[in-house]
Amino acid sequence: MKETYMVVKNGKITLKIKQSNAQKYIDLGDRGRFCINNKLNDLTGKEWIKETKSWFILRPKRRTGDVLLHPAKFPESLVEKYISFFTKKGQMVLDPMAGTGTVNFICEKLERIGFSIELEQKYYEIGRNRSNQHFYLGDCKNIEHFKIPEVDYIITSPPYWDSLKRNSLRQKKRKEDGLDTEYSTDEKNFENIENYEDFLSQLVDFYKNLKRWLKKKGYMTIIVNNIYKNGKLYPLAFDLASELGKYYILKDERIWCQDDKPLIALGVNSAYVANRHHIYCLIFRNE
Ligand SMILES: C[S@@+](CC[C@H](N)C(=O)[O-])C[C@H]1O[C@@H](n2cnc3c(N)ncnc32)[C@H](O)[C@@H]1O
């Protein structure tokens, strides 16, 4: 039953309608109950609460086909999880360093509108063929040159500085298979900035500027990691969280646990070298 009631505030009378609990919720069976006042997404309360745990395990399917060429694509299941949580059907999502266009691909699947930019032609071509969403080729630092509106949500992953360029076991195998082991030598590519401090400050400047493309109260998720190089950990994820926290509100550092990666004998009987099997999902809000 709908109940109407009057509110008198500063001498002004407003008529309000109170909804009964039964009218506020739609029963979606096994999925749980969807609240029609849900402002953020199309999830039920049961689905929502699962996504608030600060860590999660994801075992992505093995990649196949032309997307294999990209040395550091993020999994579809990860993107689906975040786009479903931070947007509703019909809303707009941006990935300014889009690689093979995974964000656009999932936008199409979930009926969102995707906008992507990628610097490297070879990944852009792959991405463009994966969906009919908006995909631009070029340097994301020139974002104002592309037709990109203010979006509801940003999800993205930058190069982890120069980490791909180092010769790990995985890179060796990829080289043998004729797959890319780095993005390119283009100096516009963030991965080619030599010094860590310069890399960090240029990345921070870019994300800071990106705020103009994110609606007020919109969220931004950055998938990123700390970087182990020459026996030392460079805290890229922590540095980004702390620097960008000056311009956005940092809401969480969710941890994606990669428990499907094999343990490698690193430094055994000699010194501590970690098997790094987790990635950070930094969640910011434009408040
Ligand atoms: C971690 S990968 C992103 C992968 C992507 N999420 C996917 O699923 O394929 C980072 C991407 O940023 C791109 N990139 C680096 N510097 C860029 C720039 N200045 N403008 C646009 N893209 C850039 C790289 O070429 C690379 O494809």
Image (tube, rainbow, N blue to C red):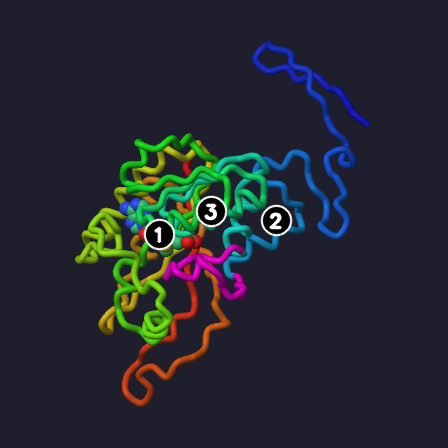
* Magenta span contains residue 101: no
Considering only order in the chain, which callout, 3 or 2, is on the residue closer to the N terminus?
Answer: 2
Q: Nearer the viewer, mark 2 or mark 3?
A: 3
Q: Earlier in the sequence, mark 3 or mark 1?
A: 1
* 269 sits left or right of 11 in the view: left
Determine whether the beta carbon of the residue marked 2 sits less than 8 angstroms from the nearest atom of ligand 1. Answer: no
Residue 273, image quadrant:
bottom left
- At 50% from the left and 40% from the top, the residue drawn is 132
Q: Position of residue 78 (x, y in %)?
A: 51, 55
Q: Dot 1 lies on which element?
A: helix
The residue indicated by pointer 3 is: 129
Does the magenta segment cover residue 71?
Answer: yes
Label tally: 3
What span is in magenta? 56-76
Q: Is residue 157 visible?
A: no
* Residue to which mark 1 is pinned: 122
Q: Which quadrant does the C terminus fall into?
A: top left
Disc 3: CA contacts within 10 A as few (<14), some (14-19) or many (>=20):
few
Earlier in the chain: of badge 2 and badge 1, it is 2
Residue at the (31%, 46%) spot, across then down: 119
Task: Compare residues 90 and 10 and report the one nearer the observer.
Answer: 90
Marks 2/1: CA distance?
37 Å
Which element carries disc 3, helix, strand or loop? loop
Ligand 1 closer than 8 Å to label 1 CB: no
Separation (CA) of disc 3 from disc 1: 11 Å
Q: Nearer the viewer, mark 2 or mark 1?
A: 1
As drawn, 148 above or below 10: below
Q: Amino acid at mark 2?
A: Trp
Q: Position of residue 69 (x, y in %)?
A: 39, 60
Compared across the picture, whether 254 is left or right of 240 comes to right
